[in-house]
Image: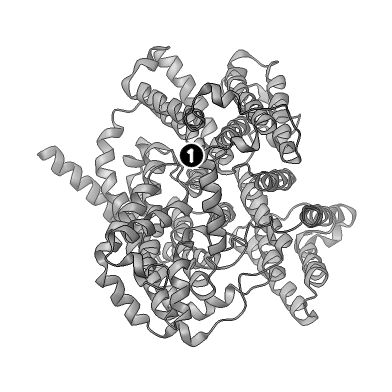
Amino acid sequence: MDAITGEMAFMGVAASKAFFILMDPTRLMYLAAGCMMGLVLGIVPGIGGLAGTAMLLPFTFNMDPYAAFALLLGLGSTTATGDPIPAVLFGVPGGAASAATVLDGFPMAKKGEAGRALSACYMSSMMGGIFGACLLAISIPILRPVMLFLGSPELLAFAVLGISMVAVLSGNAPLRGLAAGCFGIMIAMIGTDPQSGTLRWTFNSLYLWDGLPLTPLLLGIFALPELCDLLITRTAIAAGFEKADIYKGQWQGVKDCFKHWWLIVRCSWIGGGIGSIPGISASVVDWLAYGHALKTEKGAALTFGKGDVRGVIASESSNNAKEGGALVPTIAFGVPGSATMAILLGAFLIHGLVPGPDMLNKNLDVTYSMVWSVALANILGAGMCYAFSPQFARLATLRFSLILPAVMGIIYIGAFEATRQWGDLFALLFFGLVGWCMKQFKWPRPPLILGAVLGDTIERYMFISVERYGLTWFARPVVAILFIMAGIGLLRPLLQDIRNQGGVIKLAKSFRAPRFQPSQLFTIFMLGILISMVLMATRWDFSAKIVPMVVGGIGMTVCLISLFNDMCRKPSAQTMESLVESAQHQVEQKIHMDLSSDTEHLPTTIVVKRAARFFGYLVAFMGVMAVIGLVPTVALFVVIFMRYENREPWKLVISYAIVLVFAISFVFDNVMSIPWPPTLIAQWFPALKFLPSI
């Protein structure tokens, strides 16, 4: 009893300490800034919470962990709170997490109940988000004693389990997901091998000796492809809204939430529980909660889809609760519960924190600060939505030519913050192109980031386990169970395919002679990269090459199987599950259009031309910046882009350029205090060095 009392007292002290630390005005300011950016990203077309988290990560370098996670979790916790504004007003959600909200929110707006629907969204989002934070808080005392029994073999097994979850993260492309995960692990091993000092895949570049920085990788894989698609689609979510509709009926929406509080609790359980299972997409949670409400609420079958506020409440309470749930496996085991949590693991590494036992013991106050951040972020986010709904609604009408230049400037600043070398920008450009190709060729991107984040962990824990326990650690019960679960996760898609086809013999008959299609080009490209990396690894010391060759071998194998499957599988041999998923996808596309990533409606030639123009802008931007500096380059880019791409009026162009230049100068010199990238003009004319960015 005394031990339990002492344990509860210890956690109470840590929670109290975390609360008072977070109440610091500066940290609260960062939390509020994160909330505001999360709401904006939930509404503005072209950029989602995933890309937004990647963009914010480099700005946390000089913060303490409490402020950093307050900023990042403020954004992540409120992105879904902003999503329903365009969903209700225009019938198009700001992100996939609010797709189900459209079914009842938009019909309510058509009936003149937009204010009631939005108010129900805000209140149910806040209540669901607080529930998710409570779920995380409750999980901590349960997980603390469990972590005492975990050593390096168990932590290695958890990391392997996390990588195996790419089969789930990858939807109906598990082989591609596994190949991307293997590529990510190999990216994590670039640099000096800690065991033997061997330089791995550095290409005689000093920039890569300490490994490839995570920031340009994240920004390239997630942020640049969204901007590229924004230029390709050249559109905004909607145009015009009725200001009066937003305020009318707000109090009724609040009363609806308290009237249906039990529905909110049930759907929050669904959101938090599903969110804590690694790999399940955020776009699934709201549909599961909506389906639950449809089956359990009285008379729902007759009114859902026609403007029933209960449909709005079910969807919104679940998608905000998932963030707290997703944090549980991320903090406790280093296994991210979502793609956003994979990026958040990068923040752990940046701030010297190791997910696992330390987060529930030595750094327990940091963990509790995350609980408070999620809870307070949901309260702040709901309050901001109530206060600024009309202004937020206007954000959905922003044109691509107004969004892209500012976000481009943020991305360049963020990428350069990694090591403050030109290599950061070259890495940004390379992975931006890789990320866009992955998106176009239907290759899942989160597994690559997951591999890059967990790669070092896997290699480090493997060497520690072998050194301390030899091979006996394979027989440890937890390790064996986790490896079996990982094996089932990897083999499950194959077993499911065999079952759907009616056996191995019928599966074998579903293949034909090989046929080449353009969609296979990226698979061939990835296979070529993996083969090249493995061949280079054969020349290294044994301790330096063993893990890269094993991982590379697995990656090449699954790439070959995926390529064979694409080339030789008959179209009619699709599994029943994939056909159902395809039909469901088509139905969802009729309900809403994901304009931030939808380029399939455009001819391939137009997509390729506009993508080439986008990456041409990037190359030209870097070239001009190398000569004359970032500030004048930004001014030139704004003028050329806004005038050439969308014929914006000169008055708007000039004022936009001036504001953006001053903002970037302020961030470089005052906020982040980083040196400007070196330029050629400064070498040619040293007297000009007093000018900003030169």
Q: Residue at x 28, y 39 (%)?
A: 143
- Quick one: 310 or 454, which is closer to the camera? 310
Residue 57 x, y percent position in the rendering: 55, 52
State whether residue 270 is above or below residue 173. below
How many numbered discs, if any? 1
Residue 371 relative to residue 74: left or right: left
Locate the C terminus and report the quarter of the image it occupies.
bottom right
- Quick one: 602 or 177, which is closer to the camera? 602
Indicate the amino acid at tag 1: Val
Residue 206 relative to residue 115: left or right: right
Toward the left, the furthest residue is 1
State whether residue 237 is above or below residue 479. below
Locate the N terminus and report the quarter of the image it occupies.
top left
Residue 339 x, y percent position in the rendering: 51, 47
State whether residue 51 is above or below residue 334. below
Residue 596 x, y percent position in the rendering: 62, 60
Picture quadrant of residue 237: bottom right
Toward the right, the furthest residue is 684
Local packing at callout 1 (Cα closer than 10 Å; few below 14, some 14-19, many 20+) is many
Secondary structure category for the residue under label 1: helix
Q: How is the image coloured?
A: one colour
- Quick one: 11 or 612, which is closer to the camera? 612
Is there any visible trace of residue 152 in the rendered image?
Answer: no
State whether residue 84 is above or below residue 604. below
Residue 576 x, y percent position in the rendering: 51, 40
Toward the bottom, the furthest residue is 244
Picture quadrant of residue 195: top right
Is there any visible trace of residue 360 in the rendered image?
Answer: yes
Residue 119 relative to residue 673: left or right: left
For label 1, the residue is 168
